[in-house]
Image (tube, rainbow, N blue to C red):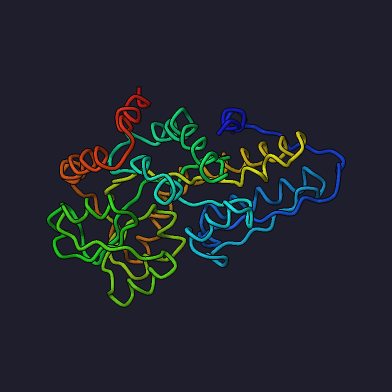
Amino acid sequence: MKQTTKLLAGLFGLVTLAGPALAEPVNFTFATTNGPNDFSSQAVVRWQQAMKEASNGELNMDFVSGGALGGDQQLLQQLATNEIQLHVAGPVVVHRLLKDYQCMEAEFVYENEDHGYRVWTGDLGNEVSDKLEEQYGITIVGVGLRGARELTAMKPIREPSDLEGVKVRVTNPLRSEVFAAYGALPGPLPVSELYGALRQGVFEAQENPIPTIWGNKFYEVQKTVNLTGHVISYYVISANKEFVDSLSDQQREIFDKTLADSIAWLNDKVRNDTDALLEKMKAEGVEIVEPDVPAFRKIAMPIVQKFAAENCRPGLLDDIAKAAQ
C-alpha cells in the first residue's frame, strides 16, 4: 500500500484537479457485491464522476454493483487476473486470500474506530497490501470506515444466553466460533440471499454495520437491532496492481486524490448518518436494544486469542494492540 500515506494525507479539503486529456480514454471496471444503496456504492459513484471530470473524460470507470459480476470470491479472482480492475468490500481480502491476517477483523480487537483505522492504514495495512501484491497481483488503494457490526434478531438480545439456539448468519470461521460460544447456531450465507433467508426463517438473526442493515432492508424482516458493536469493520478498496501501474503519473495523481476525497465523504457519512438510520428503523417499528457488551466480550476474547494463536500470523494481536497507543 505504498500510495496509502499520500492518499490519506489529502482526505480533507481536497481540490479537484483538472487539465487537458492526455491520451486515449482509460476504460476500467469497478465491481462489488454491495448494493447500490450501500454507502460504499454511493461513494464510488461520487468518485467515478469526480475522476471523470478531473481527467476530462480520460479516466472512465464502469461501476457494477449488487454482485452482478459474481460473489466476492469470484470478484477477487477476476481482480487478480485483471478482468476487473477494482473491488470494494469488507476485509474479504484477508478472510479469503490472506488468512494469516483474518484477525484484523476479529471481535473486540479495536478500542474504537480510530484504532482500527490506524491498523488498516499503517504498518499492518501496508504489510497486507505487500503480501497481496506478491501473491496475487492485488494492491490496497484505500480504506474507508464501514462501522460497528450490530446484531439484528427476532427478539431482544441483551446477554449471550439470549442467543441460545438462535440461527445466526455469520461471515467467517472465527465469528462462527464466537457465536457458537454464545449458544447460537451460526452458519454462512451470501449477503445477496440473506433477506429471503431471514424472511423465511432459515436464519433468525444476522450481524452487519447499521448502513448495511439499512441498505439491504434487513430491518423489514427482523424485530430488533441489538447494539453489540462486536466488530468495527472497514471497507477495503483493492485494485489490480498491473492496472494501477499502467496509469501515467498525472492519471495516478487524479486517481488518488479523487479517491481520497470520496473516502473522506464516506467516512463522514458513516459517522454522521448511523444514528439517523437507527431512528428511521425505530420509526419502522424495530426495537433498539442496549445489550450487556462486556458479557459478550468476556466470552469472545479467549476464543479470539486461541483462534489467532492457531490461525493467524505470530504477534498479530499484539501488533494490533500496539496501534492503539
In the displayed structure image, the side of residue 65 where residue 180 appears, left or right: left
In the displayed structure image, the side of residue 186 where residue 240 appears, left or right: right
Residue lying farthest front?
135
- In this rendering, the count of numbered labels is 0
Q: Give the quarter of the figure containing the N terminus.
A: top right
Q: Give the quarter of the figure containing the C terminus.
A: top left
Residue at point 35%, 35% (across, down): 112
Position of residue 206 measured from the top left corner of the image (x, y, whole percent): 31, 61
**Quarter assignment of residue 170:** bottom left
Position of residue 209 measured from the top left corner of the image (x, y, whole percent): 39, 52
Residue lying farthest top?
325
Residue at point 47%, 61% (across, down): 215
Residue lying farthest bottom?
200
Q: Identify which residue, 165 or 311, lies in the foreground.
A: 311
Q: Identify which residue, 192 or 111, lies in the foreground.
A: 192
Question: In the figure, 322 relative to 283: above or below?
Answer: above
**Quarter assignment of residue 118:** top left
In the displayed structure image, the side of residue 102 where residue 13 appears, left or right: right
Question: In the figure, 309 relative to 218: above or below?
Answer: above
In the displayed structure image, the side of residue 282 where residue 211 appears, left or right: right
Position of residue 94 measured from the top left corner of the image (x, y, whole percent): 42, 45
Residue at point 17%, 40% (across, down): 302
